[in-house]
Image: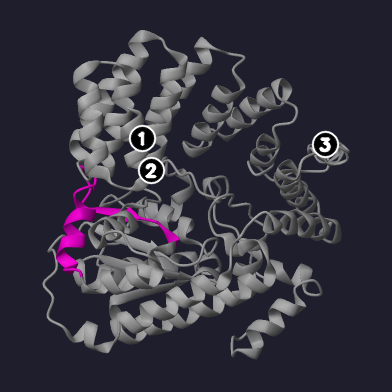
Amino acid sequence: MLLGRAQQKQGIAGQALDSAQAARSRAPGHPAVELLYIECLLQSGDYQQGLASLEQLTTHAHAAGNARLLQDVGQLHTNLNRHREAEACYGAAVRLAPRDAAALYNWSTALTAVGRLADAERALDQVIALQPRDADAYYNRSTLRRQTSERNHIAQLSAQLAQPDLPPAAQVPLGYALAKELEDLGDYDGAFSALQRAAGQRRRMLSYHVESDEEAMAAIRRSFDAPYFRRQQPGLPDARPVFILGLPRSGTTLVDRILSSHSQIDSRGESSDLGAAVMRLAGPASDKQQLIERAARLEPAAIARAYCARLPAGQRAHLIDKTPVNFLYVGLIAHGLPHARIIHVRRHPMDVCYAMYKTLFRMAYPFSYDLADIGRYYLAYSVLMAHWRTHLGARLIEVDYEQLVLHQESTTRRLLAEGGWPWEDACLEFHRNDTPSLTASAAQVRQPIYSSSVGLWRRYAAQLAPLAAQLSDHGVAIE
């Protein structure tokens, strides 16, 4: 098991699977061994066997009444975007161990994904009562609904932040929570001040350099150039995938909910499957540049086969992958899956940049904690999308967030028509869609469409003036 875990960490999935199978032969049915075996199956690309084994272990965990195992199995389901299955596991764990703060926290996450937001808030209240210094619980709770003057946590958050021994790692989520609640109540100066402190603290904890992402996007443009698109490269004739991509907080989740309300379209949420397939087939690389160059030499159909092998079986004809950063892989998608729909969601540059800045992504999007980094990342993304637009033409379906929220029906009709789907009224009632969602917008998409986020950045025009100037100086239209 230890050898398998070490090999797993090194990314040598085949050897890790061999070690897991050897451990399994020595201890048949051992839960920890089964967990390792399932993880290795999934990482090595044997999705169907991994899923079958996970179903068996899930049944065993429920039958055994083992709260720890139920949580471990629930985490695997969460990683696979199987949030209903995860909620059942975590809920069972809480019933077995009602004062287990970790089980309650995990359960709240699954409850959020399946749309039971009031239950999620109550679970987080219990977490905080048991663990008053669980800063992440405070932040998650603040995001579940719009706070009001009658019902908020500002005094509690301020008291937590005033503790003299509060570690920096706790200051970050508490600060983001306070900023969110102050903004809800219209205290924009106070909100930005709290946000700036929290984001700055988070940025100081990272060793990230935005230059690495700028260079990677430039390398993608060089590798996936005009000669690449002129090559005759047979792809996989699989029309199931629908890719919704763009910057985080640009409206990708909203478009996902609208389309997955259609009878022909289902959603699998966000997934790392495409990136994982590219890295697995490209092999170990010394840096991003080498990985990009190798990816451009791969057979596109091979990447498509590896990706589609992980698509779950379903009754609907199309499956959405709503992973924003798939905008990096548009060239591979276009060649490898010539019948896939590629939908790019755009949003006003200042609104999307501010929306990223005020969201605590934790391990993802390290550029989002500094306004100058955000500006540089946005400019690199904008140039890359212009590159894809040049080479894909009408193959790239583009939707503007502002048009969607201000002219919902006409924009939705155009989106469906360009995707080749017939009109269905259910797409206008996306907030009734019960498909699980675990994104930063999980609470918002449970509501009917609203436009209060359009132009929100103007509340902070003075504080965001350097970002506006940075973008304007590079030709980005702000007004």
Say left or right for 186 vs 101. right
On the rendered image, what quadrant is the C terminus found in?
Answer: bottom right
Residue 162 placement, left or right of 24: right
- Disc 2 target residue: 9
Q: Is residue 338 above or below residue 108?
A: below
Give left or right: position of 133 versus 369.
right
Mark 3 nearby-residue class (10 Å; few <14, some 14–19, many ≥20): some
Q: How many marks?
A: 3
Q: Amino acid at mark 3?
A: Gln
Q: In terms of secondary structure, where does tag 3 sit?
A: helix
**Depth-wise, is mark 3 or mark 1 nearer the camera?**
1
Image position, residue 318 (x, y; %):
24, 54
Mark number displayed over residue 160:
3
Q: Residue at x 32, y 65 (%)?
A: 416
Mark 2 vs 1: CB contact within 8 A: yes
Residue 478 visible from this viewpoint = no
Dot 1 corresponds to which residue? 5
Q: Which residues are magenta?
A: 298-324
Q: For the N terminus, which image quadrant?
A: top left
Q: Residues within 10 Å of mark 2 (few under 14, many from 20)?
A: few
x and y percentages locating residue 398 in the rendered image: 40, 74
- SS for dot 2: helix
Eye-nearest disc, 2 or 3: 2
- Asked whether 475 falls inside the magenta stretch, the response is no
